[in-house]
Image (cartoon, rainbow, N blue to C red):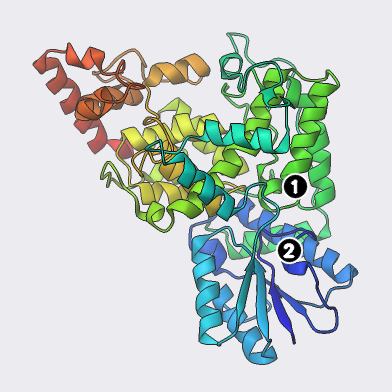
Amino acid sequence: MRNLVIILGDQLTLDNPALHDFDLTQDHIVMAEVAQESQHVWSHQQRIALFLSAMRHFASQLRAQPFPLTYFELGAHPHPDLVSVWQAMLQQHQPQAIKVCEPGDWRIWQQLQAVADAHATPLHVLQDTHFMCSIDQFKRWAAKYNEKNTSLRMEFFYRSMRKKYQILMQGDAPVGGDWNYDHDNRQALGKHGPQGVVAPPAFTPDAITQAVMAQVSAQFAAHPGQLASFAWPVTREQALTLLAHFVAEKLPQFGPYQDAMWQDQPYLWHSLLASALNLKLLNPREVIAAAEQAYVDGRASLASVEGFIRQILGWREFVRGVYWLEMPGLKSANYFAHRRDLPVWFWTGQTQMQCLSQCIGQTLQTGYAHHIQRLMVIGLFSTLAQLSPQQVSDWFLAVYVDAVEWVELPNVAGMALYANGGRFTSKPYVASGAYIQRMSNYCAGCQYDPKQKTGERACPFTTLYWAFLIRHEALLAANPRTRLMVKHVAHMAADEREAISAFAEQRLQQLALL
């Protein structure tokens, strides 16, 4: 054997660089399903099923080419983890080298290197050309940017990517004259709620997916979530169908209401494309091109299209670069020294806080929540409640179908929890219950009042927000973006500060009961 080509579970594309120059007579592919990848965090049943079904469908595609493939199916081999699989393949075949595309997880990269070193086999880790900015390119951009700035900013990276790829550009100027349209894209839904939302296409499980679901139900029955509503794309063809649906039916309304939330409306106008992108069933270039063409054709506004493209070309590429720049330190970062354990209701959704009951309940039901539900409800509460960043990050990695560590960890630890002290965010993302009331109808019927700081009906978000401001007044006052937040704190009487802080501590002691 010349090359043992390892394909990981989130590298499901024939454009995988590890397949370039593949020799059908001398090279061999290995893919493996192992229990440990579902258990190192307590993975949602839909997340497990999505990965396994997509992997098996891709394996069928490889065999049809035909590529020589050894596929280790869960339950049909004795190996508990990927390391054991790779060791067995190396011992059996003694390849001249190992080829693999860059993993999306620091842990996996370290394991690959350790196995290769132990077997004295060269390891060739190839640049992941799925992404539009390589790890080295991002490091160079960051080094240059940091010559004049103390922390990285996605906005300026995004502008450089727009220029590089000439997306929504007229020469060196952005189409429409503005780089972003955030001011147009933060609307609430109003008292009548969402109107005209079209349901996403549901992909009926085929025989492969049905077999996977039966196996997950049997082997991972104790894991969070359920499979009854499973309808995620597991093939490239299904992913392309979902992309076409989004561009035609949802992109026109996506922009204005991308931050809005509504009870029992998990999807609204969001694309639901993240899992397909992160499994590499879709290429970001084709997703961006489809959205840009909708603007050119007059089928969607510039604000909607720019807002969507910024998520793919800007934030997605940016957080991947940040992940590899900040690892392994990001995994253990804890700027505020938050140590509280995750409440048990994070695994059940059974809390009296309506917003968290909705967002976590929806997550457990579907394996999905949109970015504001994750950042400004679940993430916000986690910061205000002083929850351990490591426990919160592991929870996010476990419960969302689109979660791969390169995208999950920077978003959660870095952005939502400010655990790395603002290396790439300009401020802690904190707010009172008033924000949630403004952007959703979650507060309707909730037993807590977002206007009250103390008392039994006081919204925990509001109480903990003011306690956070009091506790970190000096830090926030020194930041131009949060200085206004703490002006009110500066004028508070000492007894009011003490009352809020004492009530907040009482609330924190009651976390399991909230």
Q: Of the residues tagged 1 and 2, which is closer to the observer?
A: 2
Q: Which residue is denoted by mark 2 in the rendering?
A: 17
Kindly report the distance in space between the C-alpha atoms of the residues bearing marks 1 and 2.
14 Å
Residue furthest top as drawn: 191
Q: Nearer the viewer, residue 245 or 173?
A: 173
Q: Is residue 408 above or below residue 261?
A: below
Q: Is residue 348 visible?
A: no
Q: Nearer the viewer, residue 205 or 409?
A: 409
* Residue shown at the point (24%, 30%) measured from the top left: 475
Image position of 195 (left or right of 21): left
Residue 413's spot in the image, x, y percent?
41, 44
Q: How many labels were placed on the picture?
A: 2
- What label sits on residue 283 in the rendered view? 1
Q: Quadrant of residue 207?
A: bottom right
Q: Is residue 60 above or below residue 85?
A: above
Image position of 464 (left or right of 308): left
Q: Is residue 505 visible?
A: yes
Image position of 361 (left or right of 484): right
Earlier residue among tags 1 and 2:
2
How busy is the neighbourhood of tag 1: few (under 14 within 10 Å), some, or many (20 plus)? some
Amino acid residing under circle 2: Pro
Q: Nearer the viewer, residue 498 or 91?
A: 91
Q: Secondary structure at mark 2?
A: helix
How busy is the neighbourhood of tag 2: few (under 14 within 10 Å), some, or many (20 plus)? many
Amino acid residing under circle 1: Asn
Residue 126's spot in the image, x, y percent?
65, 65
Of the 4 image quadrants, the one containing the N terminus is bottom right
- What label sits on residue 200 in the rendered view? none
Residue 163's spot in the image, x, y percent?
67, 33
